[in-house]
Image: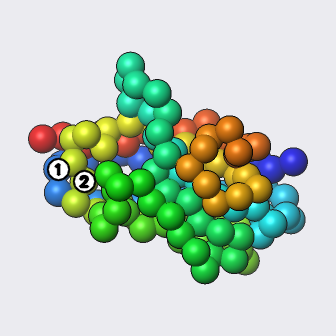
Amino acid sequence: QVQLVESGGGLVQAGGSLRLSCAASGRTFSSYAMGWFRQAPGKEREFVAAISRSGASTYYADSVKGRFTISRDNALNTVYLQMNSLKPEDTAVYYCAAGTAMVAAATRYNYWGLGTQVTVSS
């Protein structure tokens, strides 16, 4: 069992940056691939980024490639999402998730946090 708690969301102007954190409970954090997803009002949840168990491999949605960076610190049981050059269309609730593979499919992730709101003003 893994519990995930996101933090770091907030209100930022377009072009600004935010760093999201996701703290995981338990001693098996390093056995999970981790992902970030987001959901805007009236839209389906969408994949943002994923990282392998060791952190050596990463995978991004085309919409955030070159602007967002996912990383993890297995000693601290934490995964991060550094978001730069933010756009109003990045506004959403951002969720972290733990799963068995570094994939874009939300169904492959077993554990989810409650989310953190990111709002980008124009």
The residue carrying mark 2 is: 86
Residue name at image x 70 percent, y 45 percent: 109
The type of residue carrying mark 2 is Leu
Whether residue 14 can be seen here: yes
The type of residue carrying mark 1 is Ala
Q: Secondary structure at mark 2?
A: loop
Q: Is residue 41 left or right of residue 100?
A: left
Q: Are marks 2 and 1 in contact (CB under 8 Å)?
A: yes
Residue name at image x 25 percent, y 40 percent: 89
Residue name at image x 76 percent, y 61 percent: 32
Q: Residues within 10 Å of mark 2 (few under 14, many from 20)?
A: many
The Cα–Cα distance between marks 2 and 1, rounded to whole angstroms, is 5 Å
How many numbered discs?
Answer: 2
Residue name at image x 34 percent, y 62 percent: 65
> Horizontal and vertical percent for residue 87?
21, 48
Which of the 4 image quarters holds residue 27? bottom right
Q: Secondary structure at mark 1?
A: loop
Q: Earlier in the sequence, mark 2 or mark 1?
A: 1
Image quarter (top left, top right, bottom left or bottom right) of the C terminus:
top left
The residue carrying mark 1 is: 14
